[in-house]
Amino acid sequence: MADSSDSISIDMETISLGAKEYLVKTRCGMVSVAVFGDQDKPALVTYPDLALNHISCFQGLFFSPEVNSFLLHNFCIYHISPPGHEVGAAPIGSDDLMPSVDDLADQVLEVLNFFGLGAVMCMGVTAGAYVLTLFAMKYRQRVLGLILVSPLCRAPSWTEWLLNKVMSNLLYFYGMCGVVKELLLKRYFSQEVRGSVEESESDIVQACRRLLDERQSINVQQFLEAMNGRRDLSEGLRKLHCRSLIFVGENSPFHSEALHMTSKLDRRYSALVEVDSKC
């Protein structure tokens, strides 16, 4: 591991279920990494979606006793948060460099080097899936496998680009307002989970809505702008020879993107799992 002067270690047992959180210094600023488990075990690196961190994005998965037991028995888990998305994060300064998606992928490499990790498993959700896929393409020898949930791999369509610009302006002028939260919740959850006029929101949606209130809007805007400037990775996917497993809901807004990505990956090393959104 790198010298302790390069990081700050914070105990967050009450928040992160026993994790130890590190702030790792990178070329593009500090990155929060929450570490679960025995660091002598193989590493599983996670990266969440826009406006989420490891608590709001992966808490449901790791609250499952079977999944939690399996993962912690076999892996040490390194949850990387996008810059400024960790619990209690301060607003990113206006003079700070706005990272690109390449910068975010390079930060993953710097985190691995800080902890002295070699080749790792990676798990990412939507925007986080893009960052980890880009990381795998740039540093193939450092990735054993990819687990991607509702992934992105193409450049944003004009529709997505315009919607992201609207969200970015709302975040800049009005913060994490009601409209932005509704757009994000539609991104995360199916209509069945979000509820309707006749049916109330599920507990998980209500909890996520509260957690979004804790995000610093300028920090979310920077991650959103980075993702809005992403490039198409399609042509390079065939060269990925690590094992890749893609999960997507049948009614997910990212369903077509997942199908496209699966068609571009080498079928010898990849598989697609379509999940019933009502499950």
Image: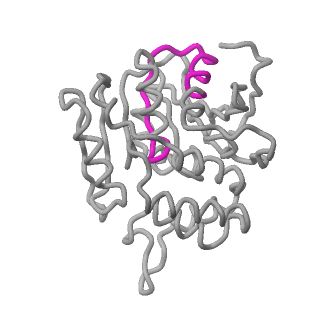
Q: Residue furthest left?
A: 268
Residue 4 in the figure: left or right of residue 46:
right
**Residue 120 against residue 100 in the figure, above or below:** above
State yes or no: residue 112 in magenta. yes
Q: Quadrant of residue 236?
A: top left
Residue 167 in the figure: left or right of residue 215:
left
Q: Residue furthest bottom?
A: 198
Q: Position of residue 42 (x, y in %)?
A: 45, 19
**Residue displayed at 58% across by 44% down:** 226
**Residue displayed at 70% across by 57% down:** 217
**Residue 274 against residue 17 in the figure, above or below:** below
Q: Nearer the viewer, residue 157 or 187?
A: 157
Q: Nearer the viewer, residue 180 or 37?
A: 180
Q: How is the image coloured?
A: one colour
**Image quadrant for the N terminus?**
top right
**Residue displayed at 53% across by 16% down:** 117
Q: Nearer the viewer, residue 241 or 226?
A: 226
**Residue 48 against residue 175 in the figure, above or below:** above
Residue 262 in the figure: left or right of residue 26:
left
**Residue 119 against residue 93 in the figure, above or below:** above
Point out the stretch of residues depicted in magenta: 107-129
**Residue displayed at 55% across by 30% down:** 78
Residue 227 in the figure: left or right of residue 82:
left
Q: Position of residue 160 (x, y in %)?
A: 46, 59
Q: How many marks?
A: 0
Q: Position of residue 48 (x, y in %)?
A: 52, 44
Q: Residue furthest front?
A: 158
Q: Position of residue 104 (x, y in %)?
A: 58, 34
